[in-house]
Image (cartoon, grey):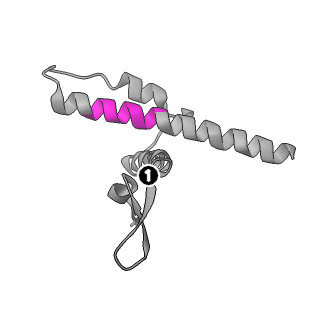
């Protein structure tokens, strides 16, 4: 029972972190697209990332992309609905359809 409670708390913390990252990512892109500012500080986005992505750590764009997509998927999965198409098959609707898929990383030496 205690392990289940601890795991539930960990999942809730992951969801809250994902929500923060998704919010700050959305805000950063909105400012990039709509602002007339000559520059933009990504500090709020950087502050919302977990310790592995803090300054001084070595992460590449692929790891950041994978983490970011994971956060977006986590957030979007809580906001989807299921509908039935003409053939009677269930399909997901909502933002998940925008980022659904598989990410494959290939490393060549």
In this view, the residue farthest toward the bottom is: 87
Residue 41 appears left or right of 60: left
- Magenta region includes residue 26: yes
Q: Tell which of 99 and 45 is nearer to you.
A: 99
Q: Judge whether 26 appears above or below 97 on screen.
A: above
User: Which of the 4 image quarters holds residue 96?
Assistant: bottom left
From the image, which quarter does the C terminus lie in? bottom left
Residue 45 appears left or right of 15: left
Is residue 52 at all visible to an observer of this figure?
no
Residue at 23 percent of width and 27 percent of height = 31
Q: Judge whether 4 appears above or below 108 on screen.
A: above
Q: Tell which of 87 and 42 is nearer to you.
A: 87
Q: Which residues are magenta?
A: 20-29
Q: Judge whether 41 appears above or below 71 on screen.
A: above
The image shows residue 5 at horizontal and vertical percentages of 79, 42
Q: Tell which of 71 and 41 is nearer to you.
A: 71
Q: In what element is the residue under mark 1?
A: helix
Residue 92 appears left or right of 6: left
What is the count of numbered marks?
Answer: 1
- Magenta region includes residue 34: no
Residue at 46 percent of width and 25 percent of height = 47
Residue that label 1 marks: 66
Residue at 38 percent of width and 23 percent of height = 43
The image shows residue 24 at horizontal and vertical percentages of 38, 30
The image shows residue 22 at horizontal and vertical percentages of 41, 38
User: Which of the 4 image quarters holds residue 21?
Assistant: top left
The image shows residue 59 at horizontal and vertical percentages of 45, 43
What is the chief secondary structure element of the magenta stretch? helix
Q: Residues within 10 Å of mark 1 (few under 14, many from 20)?
A: some
Is residue 44 at all visible to an observer of this figure?
yes
């Amino acid at each position: 029972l205690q392990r289940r409670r601890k795991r539930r708390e960990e999942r809730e913390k992951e969801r809250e972190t994902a929500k923060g990252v998704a919010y700050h990512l959305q805000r950063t892109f909105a400012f990039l697209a709509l602002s007339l500012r000559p520059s933009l500080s990504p500090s709020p986005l950087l502050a919302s990332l977990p310790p592995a992505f803090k300054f001084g750590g070595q992460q590449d764009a692929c790891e950041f992309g994978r983490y970011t997509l994971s956060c977006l998927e986590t957030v979007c999965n809580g906001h989807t609905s299921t509908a039935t198409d003409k053939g009677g098959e269930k399909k997901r609707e909502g933002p998940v359809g925008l980022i659904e898929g598989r990410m494959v990383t290939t490393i060549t030496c």
